């Protein structure tokens, strides 16, 4: 059954004659059955079918063909439409030429009233206002975009009901090739007006929001004036980039294995592209392989060799080759936007440039080994995509900051200036036409009320560096301070500067960066917000995070973070009282009282559960120490297997299990009776819990070794070489339990001995 959108158009006697309704139904059935040859024949035989809307949503057969990715069929349909339109226009011109010679003025007026003006079939829009070019741009099919818009370039500026152009939709859906194609076809005087939607969003805003940083870089290079444009919220593209910490390396967390793979992958830098560099190839069905299935390994091996050859040839022609410095200069005009970022990367290089070939070869061997060992290419591709996102976001950030130098002032990030708007357009949409179109247009005068409202909205906005500090994006904060040192004095509507926001949102990396780089510490770190809260007052407030799975661990981090900020500067540096007359210590105790109570309850439950396990291990270990495998010799009262290595393992492991299990039991019993002051959550209580867990794990492991050593004497002649396998399987349940508990154990271990608290990765907008 067809979907509700693809239902045939209903018969309407007021609007359609029977012949038109029959054509619509006939075309709908052909399109749903995939009989496109018959659709093309109908378009050829019956030109009125070009205007037929065959679905309830107002789609023509051309709309359906575009959505079905029927490239050759779309080209044939467009050709038939163009030929028919040209034929009709030529016929009209001939008729007008004849009428101008013989007809009188009245007859010309009468004939003019009878003349019908049809909408061009390629300009027909469905209920959402989308033309076939809108749909082709949305799916990113370059071949269909060229086919439709090459001879009708004004379609690139057509807008749907959401005031979106095909150029905008290509950027919205991240279709870079289609965007570059439509960019070349678009009228240069209308590119900026076509790059904005009715609600004020630009193509650069959409590309950054969709994390299409390669496309966003191309837009920033080609539409430099959009870099400082704002949407209705008053956000520039740099604002949106600052709200996405996951797009940067400092905002992503990688495991130790993924981190190794991450640094071994190579990502090329972005360069400005043009549509002329793309080769349009028809989308064809994949052909079956021309070799037997058992030859797949050999084919993959030759593909690996091909990649290896590419690495060698590419490394030799590297533009940073010190022996051929002129190669690096030939691309200077193309890469002016990335010169500053390239200089920063050159300062961070760990190896000389002539080592690049060896390094890339090592990376290639490492990636090949990962695939051979079965770690999987999917994991590598995910890490590759993540590194591309991190590298390209920094490159895009440098591009945005390079053209924001003249705009980084008190008006940066403010709402757009109110302007006269048309129906269906917002102030932000109309603003871009006055700002960027080269035609001489003078914006109307603003009224006093609108000016006051704009000033109020400006006060509510924050600059990108404040958003980046709130989200912990070290790269952006560092780069902005490097280019615009005055940005360190930015404050938001609550009079919070970068230091206060970093402290309040638990961003130790940002705070540490400011401690190392801030020159005016007396003014920056001594600032208070509108409520008189200093950095120490804000850090004393309870911070919420989903990263802390247990109340005691979160309480430990809160105490550590408070101590870290307090000890980072002189004790009397911060303001002692806020406007409510409270000190930072009083605020800390009031806000963390409930968390400390929950942390104490959690410690009690954990210690009670673990003490039961420790008691059982101690009882078993005590029984094993009083038992001698093989018995005792009657003549000497010595163990029968006294000199056997297995007996020594049994005796030592049983003693270790007994000692550590008793120690663990005593430690867990001491936790419920320990003092529960807030300072105790920093080291005292976590260390007791850590000691108890360590002793418990050691005692469980020693008990298993003791069991295997004692049992070996009974089955040593039966099991022979398979003894170790049998005992490993017997210990598997205990090993699974230990592995399941190790993440919590290592979290507690790391948090106890870590000086600077772990940063937050929660998105703050």
Image: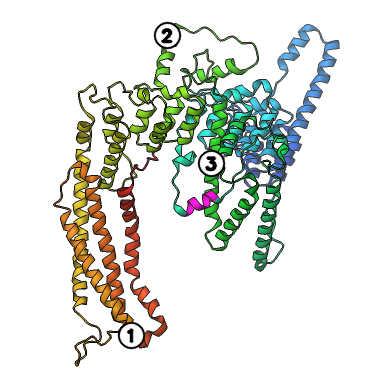
Q: Which mark is residue 43?
A: none
Q: Is residue 25 visible?
A: no
Q: Which residues are magenta?
A: 257-263
Secondary structure category for the residue under label 2: helix
Given this view, does label 3 or label 1 mark the residue nearer the observer? Answer: 1
Q: Is residue 611 visible?
A: yes
Q: CA distance from mark 3 to mark 2?
A: 44 Å
Residue located 57% across and 19% down the image: 432
Judging depth in this view, the residue of 149 and 752 nearest the camera is 752
Residue 188, image x and y in percent?
A: 68, 23
In terms of sequence position, does the residue under pointer 3 or pointer 2 come before the other?
3
The residue labelled by disc 2 is 449
Which quadrant of the figure has residue 97? top right
Secondary structure category for the residue under label 3: helix
Q: Point out the residue furthest to the left here.
A: 673
Main secondary-structure element of the magenta-colored stretch: helix
Left or right of 711 in this view: 472: right
In terms of sequence position, does the residue under pointer 3 or pointer 1 come before the other?
3
Determine whether 716 is above or below 748 in the image: below
Residue located 24% across and 69% down the image: 657
Residue 588, image x and y in percent?
A: 23, 34
Q: Which mark is residue 389?
A: 3
Which quadrant of the figure has residue 220? top right
Determine whether 650 is above or below 736 in the image: below
Residue located 49% across and 14% down the image: 418
Judging depth in this view, the residue of 258 and 658 nearest the camera is 658
Whether the magenta-drawn stretch holds residue 605 is answered as no
Which quadrant of the figure has residue 681? top left
Judging from the image, the colouring scheme is rainbow
The residue labelled by disc 1 is 715
Residue 270, image x and y in percent?
A: 62, 38
Left or right of 656 in this view: 104: right
């Amino acid at each position: 059954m067809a979907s509700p959108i693809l239902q045939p158009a209903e018969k309407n006697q007021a609007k359609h004659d029977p012949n038109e309704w029959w054509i619509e139904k006939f075309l709908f059935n052909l399109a749903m059955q995939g009989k496109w040859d018959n659709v093309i024949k109908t378009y050829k035989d019956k030109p009125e079918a070009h205007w037929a809307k065959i679905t309830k949503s107002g789609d023509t057969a051309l709309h359906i063909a575009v959505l079905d990715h029927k490239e050759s069929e779309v080209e044939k349909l467009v050709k038939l439409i163009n030929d028919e339109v040209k034929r009709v226009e030529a016929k009209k011109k001939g008729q007008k030429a004849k009428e101008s010679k013989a007809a009188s003025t009245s007859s010309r007026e009468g004939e003019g009233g009878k003349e019908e003006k049809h909408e061009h079939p390629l300009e027909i829009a469905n209920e959402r206002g989308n033309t076939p070019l809108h749909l082709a741009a949305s799916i990113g099919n370059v071949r269909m975009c060229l086919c439709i818009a090459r001879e009708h370039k004004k379609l690139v500026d057509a807008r749907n009901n959401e005031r979106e152009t095909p150029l905008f939709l290509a950027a919205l859906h991240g279709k870079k090739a289609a965007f570059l194609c439509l960019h070349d076809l678009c009228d240069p005087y209308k590119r900026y007006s076509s790059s904005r939607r009715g609600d004020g969003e630009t193509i650069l805003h959409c590309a950054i929001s969709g994390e299409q940083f390669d496309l966003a870089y191309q837009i920033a290079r080609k539409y430099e004036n959009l870099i400082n444009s704002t949407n209705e919220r008053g956000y520039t593209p740099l604002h949106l980039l600052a709200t996405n910490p996951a797009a940067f390396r400092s905002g992503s967390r990688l495991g130790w294995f993924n981190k190794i793979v991450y640094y071994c992958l190579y990502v090329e830098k972005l360069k400005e592209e043009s549509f002329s560099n793309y080769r349009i190839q028809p989308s064809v069905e994949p052909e079956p392989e021309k070799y037997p299935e058992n030859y797949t390994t050999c084919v993959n091996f030759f593909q690996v060799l091909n990649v290896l050859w590419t690495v060698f040839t590419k490394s030799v022609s590297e533009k940073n080759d010190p022996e051929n410095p002129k190669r690096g200069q030939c691309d200077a005009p193309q890469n002016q936007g990335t010169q500053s970022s390239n200089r920063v990367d050159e300062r961070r290089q760990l190896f000389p440039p002539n080592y690049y070939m060896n390094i890339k070869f090592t990376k290639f061997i490492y990636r090949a080994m990962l695939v051979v060992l079965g770690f999987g290419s999917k994991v590598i591709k995910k890490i590759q995509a993540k590194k591309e996102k991190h590298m390209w976001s920094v490159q895009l950030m440098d591009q945005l900051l390079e053209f924001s130098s003249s705009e980084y002032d008190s008006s940066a990030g403010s709402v757009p200036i109110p302007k006269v708007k048309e129906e269906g357009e917002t102030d932000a949409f109309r603003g871009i036409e006055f700002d960027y179109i080269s035609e001489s247009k003078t914006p109307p005068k603003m009224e006093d009320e609108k000016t006051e409202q704009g000033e109020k909205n400006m006060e509510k906005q924050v600059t990108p560096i404040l958003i980046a500090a709130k989200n912990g994006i070290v790269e952006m904060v560092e780069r902005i301070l490097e280019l615009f040192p005055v940005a360190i004095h930015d404050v938001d509507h609550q009079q919070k500067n970068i230091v206060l926001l970093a402290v309040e949102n638990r961003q130790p990396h940002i705070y540490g960066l400011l401690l190392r780089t801030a020159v005016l510490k007396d003014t920056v770190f001594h600032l208070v917000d509108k409520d008189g809260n200093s950095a120490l007052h804000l850090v004393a407030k309870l911070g919420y995070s989903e990263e802390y799975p247990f109340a005691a661990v979160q309480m430990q981090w809160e105490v550590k973070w408070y101590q870290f900020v307090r000890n980072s500067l002189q004790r009397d540096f911060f303001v002692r009282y806020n406007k409510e007359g409270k000190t930072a210590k009083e605020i800390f105790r009031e806000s963390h009282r409930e968390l400390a109570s929950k942390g104490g309850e959690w410690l009690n439950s954990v210690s009670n559960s673990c003490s039961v396990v420790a008691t059982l291990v101690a009882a078993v270990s005590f029984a094993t120490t009083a038992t001698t495998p093989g018995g005792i010799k009657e003549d000497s009262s010595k163990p029968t297997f006294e000199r056997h290595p297995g007996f020594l393992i049994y005796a030592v492991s049983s003693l270790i299990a007994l000692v550590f299990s008793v120690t663990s039991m005593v430690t867990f019993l001491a936790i419920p009776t320990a003092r529960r002051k807030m300072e105790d959550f920093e080291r005292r209580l976590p260390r007791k819990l850590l000691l108890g867990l360590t002793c418990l794990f050691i005692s469980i492991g020693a008990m298993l070794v003791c069991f295997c050593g004692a049992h070996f004497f009974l089955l040593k002649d039966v099991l022979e070489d398979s003894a170790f396998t049998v005992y490993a399987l017997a210990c598997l349940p205990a090993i699974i339990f230990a592995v399941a508990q190790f993440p919590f154990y290592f979290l507690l271990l790391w948090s106890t001995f870590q000086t600077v608290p772990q940063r937050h990765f929660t998105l703050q907008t």
